[in-house]
C-alpha cells in the first residue's frame, strides 16, 4: 500500500503549516508598536511577495479565488487578476494577523467600527441567553471577539479544529490574560463535549465556531453549497451542534471595508436561527439550506471586499456530492 498522501489530504486546509510562530507574532506586534502602522504596512509587502513566490499552494488558491471573484463581480477588481493581486491579497492577510493581535491586546473603541445595525447589536447584548456564533475565515473574527469583550459579562468559548488556531489564541491570551475567553480544541463533538458546551450555553455564555473549514474527519461530514458560482463543501458540524445546544444562532462578520479606506472595521451580525431543528428524515435538506445561507452571507460581503477572504487552500477541491452521504448518517456530529 502506498504511504504517499492522496490529493484530498494534501489539499486539506489542516495540512498547511502554521503561518506565524510565537516569536514571529511578537515581532509583528513590536514592529507596529515601535514604528506604527504605516511602516508595518510597507515592510510586509516584501513578506507578501515572498509567500507568493515560494508558497505554491497558497498562491494557486489565491489566484483561483480571485479569478472566480473577477468572473462574478468584475467591476470590483477592474481587470483580470494577476500575481500582483495575490501579493495584495497576502498583504491584507498580514494586516489581518496584526489586527488579530490588536483586537485582543487593545481596548476596542467604538469609533473604530462601522456597525451595520446598532439596534440589532443592542438587542443582542441585552439578550441573557447563551448564543452560538458561526464565524468564518473571511475578515477577522478576532475583531468580533474583541468587540464582545467590551461587554465584560460575556464569556466566550472558542472551538478550534487544529493546533495552529489553538496556538495562536494561546499567544493572544498571554498578551491579554484578563480576557474572558476559553479555547477548546476539538476533532469531533462527542457526548461529553456537547454536554459541556450545553452547560455553558445554559448559563448565558457564548460559543464561537468557524463554519467554513472541512473537518479533519473528511468529506463524509460535509454538505455541498455554491460559492462564487462553483460547488464547494462546508462542514455539517455547526448545524448539528446548533440543534444539540438548542440556542439562538448568529452569524458575525468583522473586516476592514474598502469603502472606508480600510481605516474602519465593518461589523455585521446576522440573525440566523432561534432554534435550529430538523428530523432524521429531512436533515440533509435542512442542513444544506442553512449551509447555503451561511456561505451566501459570506459571498455578499466578499463581493465588496475581495481581499478579505483568507482561506489559502483549494476551497473547491472536491466536488463529489456529499448530501446523500450525510442523509444516511446518525445524529453524531
Image (cartoon, rainbow, N blue to C red):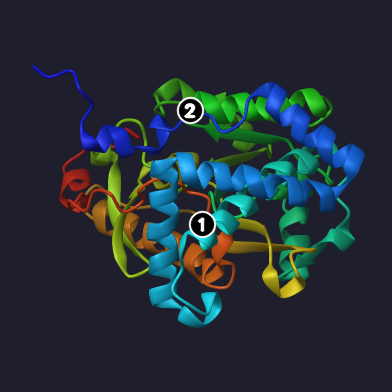
Q: Quadrant of residue 203?
A: top right
Q: Quadrant of residue 236?
A: top left
Mark 2 closeness class: few <14, some 14–19, many ≥20 residues within 10 Å: some
Q: Is residue 207 visible in this depiction of the protein?
A: yes
Foreground pick, 89 / 39: 39
**Residue lying at the far left of the rendered structure:** 1
Q: Residue at x 66, y 63 (%)?
A: 268
> Which quadrant does the N terminus fall into?
top left
Foreground pick, 10 / 223: 10
Can you tell which mark lies on residue 197?
Answer: none
Q: Quadrant of residue 216?
A: top left
Foreground pick, 250 / 21: 21
Task: Measure the alpha-carbon separation of dots 2 and 1.
Answer: 25 Å
| Mark nearer the N terminus (2 vs 1) | 1
Q: Secondary structure at mark 1?
A: helix
Q: Is residue 310 above or below residue 79?
A: above
Q: Secondary structure at mark 2?
A: loop
Q: Residue at x 21, y 53 (%)?
A: 319
Percent x, y of residue 278? 33, 53
Q: Residue at x 47, y 48 (%)?
A: 311
Q: Is residue 330 visible in this depiction of the protein?
A: no
280 sits to left or right of 31? left
Task: Tell me, yes or no, whether the two marked residues, 2 and 1, touch with CB atoms within 8 Å.
Answer: no
Can you tell which mark lies on residue 162?
Answer: 2
Residue under numbered circle 1: 86
Percent x, y of residue 275? 49, 54
Question: Number of numbered discs present?
Answer: 2
Q: Residue at x 67, y 58 (%)?
A: 255
Percent x, y of residue 57? 39, 42
127 sits to left or right of 193? right
Q: Is residue 47 above or below residue 27?
A: below
Amino acid at each position: 500500500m502506498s504511504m504517499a498522501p492522496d490529493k484530498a489530504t494534501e489539499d486539506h486546509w489542516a495540512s498547511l503549516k502554521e503561518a506565524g510562530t510565537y516569536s514571529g507574532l511578537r515581532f509583528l506586534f513590536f514592529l507596529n508598536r515601535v514604528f506604527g502602522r504605516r511602516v508595518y504596512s510597507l515592510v510586509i509587502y516584501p513578506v507578501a511577495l515572498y509567500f507568493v513566490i515560494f508558497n505554491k499552494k497558497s498562491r494557486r488558491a489565491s489566484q483561483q479565488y480571485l479569478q472566480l471573484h473577477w468572473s462574478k463581480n468584475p467591476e470590483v477588481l477592474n481587470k483580470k487578476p494577476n500575481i500582483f493581486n495575490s501579493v495584495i491579497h497576502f498583504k491584507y492577510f498580514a494586516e489581518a494577523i496584526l489586527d488579530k493581535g490588536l483586537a485582543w491586546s487593545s481596548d476596542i473603541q467604538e469609533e473604530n467600527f462601522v456597525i451595520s445595525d446598532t439596534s440589532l447589536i443592542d438587542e443582542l447584548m441585552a439578550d441573557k441567553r447563551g448564543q452560538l456564533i458561526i464565524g468564518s475565515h473571511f475578515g477577522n473574527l478576532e475583531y468580533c471577539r474583541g468587540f464582545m469583550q467590551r461587554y465584560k459579562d460575556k464569556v466566550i468559548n472558542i472551538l478550534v479544529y487544529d493546533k495552529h488556531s489553538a496556538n495562536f489564541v494561546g499567544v493572544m491570551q498571554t498578551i491579554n490574560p484578563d480576557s474572558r475567553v476559553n479555547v477548546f480544541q476539538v476533532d469531533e463533538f462527542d457526548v461529553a463535549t456537547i454536554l459541556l458546551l450545553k452547560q455553558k450555553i445554559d448559563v448565558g455564555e457564548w460559543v464561537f465556531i468557524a463554519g467554513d473549514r472541512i473537518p479533519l474527519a473528511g468529506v463524509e461530514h460535509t454538505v455541498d453549497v455554491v460559492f462564487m458560482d462553483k460547488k464547494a463543501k462546508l462542514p455539517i458540524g455547526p448545524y448539528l451542534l446548533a440543534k444539540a445546544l438548542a440556542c439562538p444562532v448568529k452569524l458575525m462578520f468583522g473586516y476592514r471595508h474598502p469603502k472606508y479606506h480600510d481605516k474602519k472595521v465593518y461589523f455585521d451580525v446576522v440573525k440566523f436561527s432561534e432554534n435550529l431543528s430538523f428530523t432524521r428524515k429531512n436533515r440533509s435538506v435542512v442542513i444544506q439550506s442553512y449551509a447555503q445561507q451561511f456561505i451566501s452571507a459570506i459571498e455578499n460581503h466578499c463581493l465588496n471586499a475581495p481581499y478579505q477572504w483568507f482561506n489559502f487552500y483549494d476551497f473547491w477541491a472536491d466536488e463529489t456530492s456529499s448530501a446523500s452521504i450525510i442523509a444516511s448518517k446518525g445524529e453524531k456530529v
